[in-house]
Image (spheres, rainbow, N blue to C red):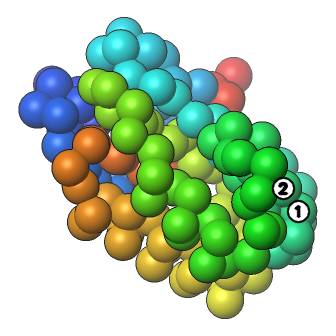
Amino acid sequence: MTSLTVTLARRESAVLRSDRSAADVRAVGERAGWRVVDLVLEEPTDKATFLAKCADAFDLPDHFGHNWDALADCIDDIRDEPGVLVAFAGAGHLSDHDREVIREIFTERVDLGPAPFVVVAAAAPATQP
């Protein structure tokens, strides 16, 4: 069993790195019955574009303020059962600063509990031929 599979089976929260593609991560989450959020960046992405992608991917409420604090507040409110799995690929398309802020936001959500929340930094959007 992989660390992702074990984490999901135990209903734990975590931030993980994986050599799997985002599509493979999604498949693991779907088999486990988790809500899977695809957060895939395929080109250079600025803060505003990333926040818009998050609004769509997480289905954030209309009052989402499109700033880092609003993102943190909104994902803190996500409590899907048995948990939420974020298949995140393409972080390299973000600035170093934005990557660090996002890492902090996701880590804080993972530490928040009680509903399981797992973020997997996937190797690529889809399995490479």
Distance in Å between CA atoms under marks 2 and 1:
5 Å
- Residue at the spot x=31%, y=59% of the render? 110
- Residue 84 vertical position relative to residue 30 in the rendered view, above or below: below
Looking at the image, residue 85 sits to the left or right of residue 12; the answer is right
- Residue at the spot x=27%, y=42% of the render? 116
Task: Find numbered disc 1 in the image and state the secondary structure of the residue it sits on.
Answer: helix
Looking at the image, residue 48 sits to the left or right of residue 32; the answer is right
Outermost residue, left direction? 10
Of 102 and 73, the residue lying toward us: 73
Residue 127 in view: yes
The three-letter code of the residue at mark 1 reads: Thr
The spot of residue 104 in percent (x, y) is: 45, 78
Label 1 sits on residue: 49
Task: Find numbered disc 2 in the image and state the secondary structure of the residue it sits on.
Answer: helix
Pointer 2 and pointer 1: residues touching (CB < 8 Å)?
yes
Quadrant containing the C terminus is top right
- Residue 123 vertical position relative to residue 96 in the rendered view, above or below: above
The three-letter code of the residue at mark 2 reads: Ala
Looking at the image, residue 127 sits to the left or right of residue 93; the answer is left
Residue 46, quarter of the rendered image: bottom right
- Residue at the spot x=36%, y=46% of the render? 118
- Residue at the spot x=25%, y=66% of the render? 111
The spot of residue 52 in percent (x, y) is: 84, 56
Outermost residue, front direction? 63
Q: Residues within 10 Å of mark 1 (few under 14, many from 20)?
A: few
Label 2 sits on residue: 52
